[in-house]
């Protein structure tokens, strides 16, 4: 198959209270070298709306937003073979060491952004000891996205603006 592509390091702060785990960075995210880099992805707009803010547009503003809001980001796949951005194309992958991250940051909830993230996470960490929830992917390819489900999950950790 193709070359092994590496994902991103986890982005977190010692005060992070929520961990959002995606599957693997899209082509557009890899191009900007940060999570949810496709402007069509609903991730940033959804979080910003929940907190009553405008969506951050550049990477530094996204990082500031995450630190301020105590949100950590990572992907369940740290490296893999993949053509394009579709989760169905993820092959020969390595799984993130979520246990190790949770020793550094005490989150109260893990959001699994989409079915592939949930599938790989539960195969490896079903008994992790932290509450986790599968949410509809924020990807623009997902026609069944539900902002309300995201808001409900975020409300478990944060107050809505």
Image (tube, rainbow, N blue to C red):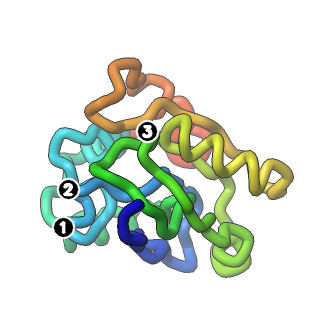
Q: Residue furthest top?
A: 144
Mark 2–mark 3 Cα distance, whole angstroms, equals 29 Å
Residue visible at 47% across and 33% down in the picture:
150
- Residue at point 25% right, 71% down? 33
Of the two numbered discs 2 and 3 on the same chain, state the one appearing first in sequence: 2
* Image quarter in which the C terminus is found: top left
One can see residue 6 in this view:
yes
Query: How far from the left and from the top, in percent, is residue 103?
Result: 73, 78
Instruction: Please give the residue where the numbered disc 1 appears in the rendered image.
Output: 32
Tell me what residue is drawn at x 73 percent, y 70 percent.
99
Q: CA distance from mark 1 to mark 3?
A: 29 Å
Q: For mark 3, what is the residue?
A: 160
The mark lying in front, picked from 1 and 3, is 1
- Helix, strand or loop at label 1? It is helix
Image depth: mark 2 or mark 3 in front: 2
| Label 1–label 2 contact, CB within 8 A | yes
Q: Quadrant of residue 153?
A: top right
Mark 2, Cα crowd under 10 Å, few <14 / some 14-19 / many 20+, is some
């Amino acid at each position: 198959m193709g070359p092994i592509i590496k994902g991103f390091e986890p982005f977190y702060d010692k005060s992070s209270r929520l961990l959002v785990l995606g599957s693997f960075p899209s082509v557009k995210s890899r191009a900007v070298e940060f999570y949810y880099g496709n402007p069509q992805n609903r991730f940033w707009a959804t979080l910003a709306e929940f907190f009553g803010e405008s969506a951050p547009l550049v990477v530094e503003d996204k990082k500031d937003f995450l630190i301020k809001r105590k949100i950590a980001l990572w992907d369940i796949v740290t490296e893999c073979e993949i053509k394009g951005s579709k989760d169905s194309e993820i092959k020969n992958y390595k799984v993130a060491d979520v246990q190790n991250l949770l020793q550094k940051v005490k989150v109260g909830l893990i959001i699994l952004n989409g079915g592939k993230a949930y599938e790989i996470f539960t195969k490896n960490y079903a008994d992790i000891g932290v509450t986790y929830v599968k949410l509809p992917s924020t990807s623009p390819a997902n026609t069944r996205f539900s902002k309300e489900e995201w808001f409900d999950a975020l409300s478990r950790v944060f107050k809505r603006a």
